[in-house]
Structure formats: structure tokens, C-alpha cells
Image (cartoon, rainbow, N blue to C red):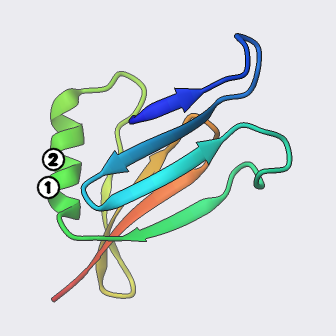
Amino acid sequence: MDWEHRFDADAPVYMQVTRGDVTLHLSEHHGDACPGAKVFIETQGVRELHAELTEKRYKYNHPGLEEAFYGAWEVTLHDPFGNRLVYVERFQ
């Protein structure tokens, strides 16, 4: 997480997160987007991302590494707002 902003302690959060060359802006504000969205992020190093997250042993988040039917590796993460962030690396 790069930063987060709230107008006050009870206000919705707006934040920026970055990993490598990918930067996302995430918002809890009503009307900014549809909760539960699914975003595909095409990148390199998906298997390494999965290994890194697995090593952290998060209590409530154990993302899997999947071989997608269309010839790619996928790791799906759930952000704090219920969205699915799918990191995709196509086979070479």
C-alpha cells in the first residue's frame, strides 16, 4: 500500500497500491465502482508472487496458483473491498 486517504475516521477509504509496474487505485466511496468487480492484471512473475504470498502464511488468505484454460498462470487475490484481482501470466 502506497497511501490511503479518508476525509475523517468514519469516511470511506481511497487508497493506492503498487506492485512492480502495476499501480491500482481502490475506493470504498459509493458510486466509484461496482463492489465485487474482477480485474485482470497481465504481468510477469505470477508463480513467484504466489510463492511470496504463500511464505507469508496469512491466516485468512491462501491464494492458489491455477493453470487457466487459455494458457496462463493465475493468482486471484481479494482486496479489502470484495474485488477480485487476478494476476495473469501467459505461457511463453
Q: Amino acid at mark 1?
A: Glu
Q: Position of residue 61 (x, y in %)?
A: 40, 33
Q: Position of residue 63 (x, y in %)?
A: 35, 46
Quarter of image, res 8: top right
**Residue at position x 48%, y 42% in the image:** 16
Circle 2 Cα neighbour tier, 10 Å, few/some/many (<14 / 14–19 / ≥20)? some
**Residue at position x 65%, y 29% in the image:** 13
Quarter of image, res 55: top left
Q: Amino acid at mark 2?
A: Ala
Quarter of image, res 92: bottom left
- Which quadrant: the N terminus? top left
Name the residue beneath numbered marker 1. Answer: 48
**Residue at position x 24%, y 56% in the image:** 20
Say left or right for 14 vs 48.
right
Give the spatial CA distance, label 1 vs label 2: 5 Å
Say left or right for 84 vs 41.
right
Say left or right for 77 vs 84.
left
Q: Position of residue 18 (x, y in %)?
A: 36, 48
Say left or right for 38 vs 68.
right
Camera-side residue of 42 and 84: 42
- Residue 10, compared with residue 76, is above or below; it is above
Name the residue beneath numbered marker 2. Answer: 51
SS class, disc 2: helix
Camera-side residue of 43 and 16: 16
Q: Position of residue 82 (x, y in %)?
A: 63, 42
